Amino acid sequence: MRPLPQSSDTLRPGLIAFLSLMAGATVANLYYSQPLLGQIARTFHASPEHVGLVAVMTQIGYALGLMLVVPLGDGQERKRLITSMTGLIAITLAAVALAPSFPMLLIFCLLMGAATTVPQLVVPYAATVAPAAERGRAVGLVMGGLLVGIVIARSVSGFAAFLGWRVIYGIAAGAMALLAVTSAVLLPKQRPTGHIPYSTLFPSLYVLWRKEPILRLHAFLGAMGFAAFSCFWTALIFHFGHIFPQHASYTVAVMGLFGTAGALAAPLSGKLSDRLSARVVNGVALLLVFTSFLIFWRAHSSLLLVACGVILLDAGVQGSHISNQTRIYALHADKRNRLTALYMTSYFIGGSIGSLVGSLAWQRGGWPAVCVSGCVFALAALVRLYWGVTKTQEPSRSLSADRE
């Protein structure tokens, strides 16, 4: 099979659909734990504060994997990299399912997070195969699948909680093994524009970060948005466990289904990001995140209000995320994997901070403290967006096109 060109005249819907499915299925592994934290705590006799480290270690591992693995896509054949990393996810998920102790579980979650880099290998794969005029749409469609995978993961693990958390992770391991085989058959090869030695690849990350203020801006916005997102979802199982002690996992699963409605905003955000400035798209998205936490604060035990807040939270975080990625992919067509690595490492560092803050806030101040924490994360992003951006930092559409 011939390698794919760097971009095609039209998008192949079947390929984009499979990439969307692959992004969603692989990223879901990072989020199965959230409705299951109560079960995991009971298995290992851990407190809510300690069991929250499961999510934290997973996200730290993911950030490490993004920094160490994703840049390789700029210098290696991408199909082989995607397929081999998917197989590695299956192995680490099996290790999580068989973890004999809580410390070993944390180590295996760190390794599983580090292996789960496939979603961020798939996104630049899609961005490269798409023509410049449709890049936002392609990224939006694949990210839509990825973000649906995030919210569906909570529903799947919540509704299947009766099976036990070990069985759920075992099933996930089998699914990843099957996906690795399928991707090896279906994905065309996609070679990089040139070979980049491993020894020069990682030093170039520092240079790229230092020279691109647009990258630094959107990395911060993404980190704060995902911190708010993770703060809420990590603490929600404990909040519902306090209100609905017999049905906490199922209630979180239902909320995950509402989050799917918010995830559908991703393709729309991608289209808008092709036409509007980052301030407009990101400003509206981050305002939705802030508003969602005001609703959560008011909701307390009202499932209807929590559901409304979940829709706004997911739509806002995902809308901001797509806008961020569309902007950074316009910077350097030949460095998209490295741009992805830097942006997504910042993104998941923010997520790990949010998970830690969410569990600590719940332990120390309950639900109001969680809501205040989410508001602070959203406000920090809004302040940075509107008071920390100069006109020279906002890329024009013509500049974006010239740099393709």
Image (cartoon, rainbow, N blue to C red):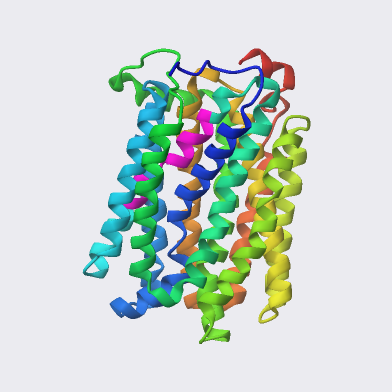
Residue nearest the viewer, comparing 9 with 358: 9
Query: Residue 396 versus residue 262: which sits nearer the camera?
Result: 262
Q: Vertically, is 270 above or below 131?
A: below
Question: Can residue 365 be seen at all in this image of the molecule?
Answer: no
Residue 169 covered by magenta stretch: no
Residue at (38% x, 20% y) in the render: 75
Q: In which quarter of the view is residue 396 placed? A: top right
**As displayed, is residue 210 above or below residue 229?**
above
Residue segment shown in magenta? 111-125
Q: Say which residue appears at 48% left-offset and 49% top-offset.
A: 25
How many numbered marks are there?
0
Decide if residue 276 is in sight here. Answer: yes
Question: Measured from the top left, where is residue 34 in percent x and y?
Answer: 47, 66
Furthest residue toward left: 100
The residue at 70%/63% (across/down) is 292
Quadrant for residue 47, please give it. Answer: bottom left
Prevailing secondary structure class for the magenta stretch in the rendered image: helix
Residue 118 within the magenta-colored segment of the rendering: yes
Rendered image quadrant of residue 221? top right
Quadrant of the snapshot with the N terminus: top left
Residue at 39 percent of width and 77 percent of height: 39
Instruction: Provide residue 188's location: percent of width, then percent of height.
Output: 46, 25
Q: Is residue 191 above or below residue 357?
A: above
> Where residue 387 appears, x then y in whole percent?
71, 41
- Residue 64 in percent (x, y) is at 36, 43
Closest to the observer: 335 or 92? 92
